[in-house]
Each structure stands twice: as structure tokens, then as C-alpha cells.
Image (cartoon, grey):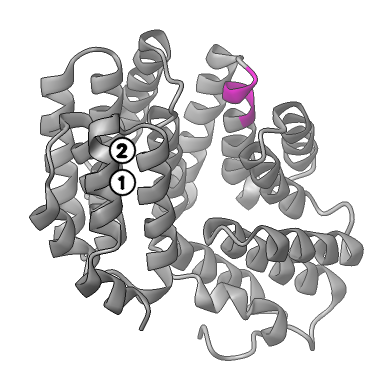
Amino acid sequence: MGRRRPTVETFPEWLRMHERRMLLGHYRGALDAPRMTTHLESRERARAWAIRASACRRMRLRNETEEAWSIAFRLSPDDPWILSRYAVWQLDQGRFAEGLRSADDGLQNAAPEDRPDALCVRAQALWLCGHRQESLSDFTAAARQAAVNSPTQLASIVNIAVVLANAPDITPKSAELVLDLASHLRSVVGNRKLPRVRALLRWATGLAEAAAGRKSAGVRDLLRARRSFLGLDDVASAAAVTLDYECLTGRSQSPLFLEVIEQAPADARPEIITRIEAMAAGRAEPSQHTALKSLAMTSNVQRRWSQ
């Protein structure tokens, strides 16, 4: 379905498929979305450009991201679906107040099936603007609606808990709030078999436990999350968890890292390189900078990344 040109009827599912694939680190199909939708109406073409913008954002292609957003808004300036996704880009740029306004506008007129995603984006904006309790309320509401609508939507929302727990400036107090959020999300999941959601929850919990001062518990949860992602063949997430583990423990875990990164999808590797470099420059201790950099540039891995 991904390589076929969608019809008006199949377009919504086609769009969701590309968003699901981006969660797993596959971006190339989303980059081609505008080319695959030239025969459709302006709203559908605008959303295809928004999907491309989201893929470019994840691949750290800033100029291409801005160009795609410009085209999307020219085609459909007031689409709430696009506004919610544009808010994520604004938040990435540190434009928190603007991102909150876009998130509010996106939520106000969101279609029922889009409300969980729109609530989730506003929750991120509220969190970054310092409104933590309101943010938790939005996250919980989004998760409860997504649990009814789609497990994939729920995984996307739980993934945000990982982002919050991984913030470089997270405080112990904020970490406790993330743990509270994870607890709420775990109650939403209940007894259902949602392995990716549970792996994401372990990841978020591990990071938050460590940030709250409970390092041993955090390390255990990160290793469990890594095993879960490997069991799901989600090597991009497994590699990212390994990096978090390495930064947290201060140990060089090159064998763990190489085991997963050499299996990563080719189009996910640029983001993983960027993540390594960001950690080396930011969260990692100075003693780890050289180890992380040399690991990123290991000739064997670099050769695979360039294929």
C-alpha cells in the first residue's frame, strides 16, 4: 500500500501507515508522500507535505522541513491536523509559547479520531511551558481515548513519556511527575498484550527513575526495555535505549550497541548518528565523549551507515 498512489478513500489509512512507520524509524516513504498524492485535492496534498515535514524533522533536515511546512500551509492554512504536527516542530525549535498556541488551535477543531494525537501535542506544549499538572491531565485523557481508537496511537503517546524523561534539564521533581504519568498510562494499558507500549513504558520509567535519584532501578528498567525492543525487532529503539544506558552507567557498552545498530534500517541511521553526537555534546560526561564519538565513527558501522 505504501508504494501505491492512494485514493481519496484510502488516503486516511495510507497517512496513518506512514506515521506508524516513522515511529519505527522508516522515513523514506514519508519523504515521497507529496509525489504520491499529486492527483488528490489540496487538503490531502497538504497533509502529505506535513508528513514529509515530520520525516525531515526526525532526520534533522532543517531546510527541507521548513520548505515542506511552507507548502503544507499554502495548500491548507487552517487544517487542525497540520497545526498539531506543526506545533511539534515549533516545540523542537524551542518556540514553546508559539507551539502551545498552535497545539490549542489544532485541538479546538480536531476530528474525533484525531483528538488523542492533538491532546498529546498540547500536553507536550503545556509541559514545556511549565504547566506540568495540566500536561498530565491532557496526556491521561489522550491515552484513554487512544486506547479505544488505536494501540498505535497509544504507543505514539507513550513515546512522549520517553521524550519527557530524556529531557536534558529534567529535575527530580519533574521526573516524579513523569513516573506518575507512566503509572497512569500503565493503568490504561491494563492486561492487554501491547508489547511495544509496555517496552516504551519501561524505557520512560527507567529514565525517570534515574533522574529521580534511583539509578539502580533505572538501569534495570532500561535493560528490560532494550530486551523488549530487540524481541520486537525494533533495532532503532533498542540502539537508543543502549545509548541511554551507556550515558547513565558511564560504562562503554560497545558490544551491546554494535549488536543493534548494525541491524538498524538504513534510513534510521542518520538520526542515530545525530543522537550519539548530541549525547556526546550534552548529556554524556566528558569522559564518555571520546568513547561515544569513536563508537559512532567505527569503520565497520560507518560503512554500513553509508550504504
- In-image side of 295 versus 83 (left or right): left
| Residue 100 higher or lower than 23, as above or below | above
SS label for mark 1: helix
Residue at image location 17% in from the left, 32% down from the top: 250
| Residue 95 higher or lower than 109, as above or below | above
| Residue 87 higher or lower than 135, as above or below | below
Q: Which residue is mark 1?
A: 197
Q: Of helix, strand and loop, which mostly describes the magenta segment? A: helix
Q: Are marks 2 and 1 in contact (CB under 8 Å)?
A: yes
Q: Position of residue 55 (x, y in %)?
A: 57, 64
Q: Amino acid at mark 1?
A: Val
Q: Which of the pair 249/11 is nearer the observer? A: 249
To which quarter of the image does residue 264 belong? bottom left
- Which is more foreground, mark 2 or mark 1? 1
- In-image side of 96 versus 197 (left or right): right
- Mark 2, residues whose alpha carbon is within 10 Å: few (<14), some, or many (≥20)? some
Task: Give the spatial CA distance, label 2 vs label 1.
Answer: 8 Å
Q: How many marks?
A: 2
Q: Position of residue 110 (x, y in %)?
A: 73, 46
Segment tinted magenta in the rendering: 125-129
Q: Which residue is mark 2?
A: 189
Q: Amino acid at mark 2?
A: Val
